[in-house]
Image (tube, rainbow, N blue to C red):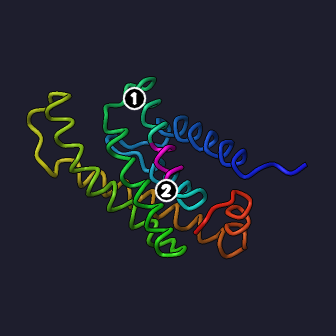
Amino acid sequence: MKTSSSTLKLVLLSMMVAIGVVISPLLRIEGMCPTAHLINIVCAVFMGPWYALLNATLIGIIRMLFLGIPPLALTGAVFGATLSGLLYRASKGSLLLAVIGEVIGTGIIGSIVSYPIMKFLVGKGSLTLFFYTPMFLTATLMGGSVAYLFLITLKKNGMLQKIQNSLGTKI
């Protein structure tokens, strides 16, 4: 019996969300969550930008509701996940551009968007526009480096192509 690619995508998405929620408090540095960026990039490469956006959103919402993480769980993930998938697709499969998309999307765009959210909605009045940028950039570089090494290994042994084919991912 052959399983449809949409079912496989939902199963993989569920697993990535579960891993993202469970591992984030374990492998976390205060103010940084490098594993979230690893998962965002892997999801973007495996399934595309819209699944990566959904993945980052679900992880962020669950972390906010059950782990007490501030809205940074969303602002620090959704832009990078989406841009990672978009650049990967636009470049026709460049893993480096997938990582760069996460770094720019989260490290720069996400950090700047986090400023007004945390200042005006959460009441952190002493923040500056680039307050979160050093932490977000550091975390994305750490998670992005691990994602790049992981995905390059999968690509070299042919597994990345097999995974993408079984998921019906279009590059």
Q: Residues within 10 Å of mark 2 (few under 14, many from 20)?
A: many
Span of residues in magenta: 49-56
Residue identified by numbered label 1: 64
Give, as a three-letter code, the residue at label 2.
Pro
Residue identified by numbered label 2: 49
What is the secondary structure assignment of the residue under circle 2? Answer: helix
**Image quadrant where residue 126 sits:** top left
The image shows residue 47, relative to residue 73, as above or below, that is below
Q: Which residue sits furthest right?
A: 1
**Image quadrant where residue 125 sits:** top left
The stretch drawn in magenta includes residue 160:
no
The stretch drawn in magenta includes residue 55:
yes
First in sequence: mark 2 or mark 1?
A: 2
What is the secondary structure assignment of the residue under circle 1? Answer: helix
The image shows residue 8 at horizontal and vertical percentages of 72, 48
The image shows residue 12, relative to residue 94, as above or below, that is above
The image shows residue 170 at horizontal and vertical percentages of 61, 65
Closer to the camera in the image, 73 or 165:
165
Give the main secondary structure of the magenta stretch.
helix
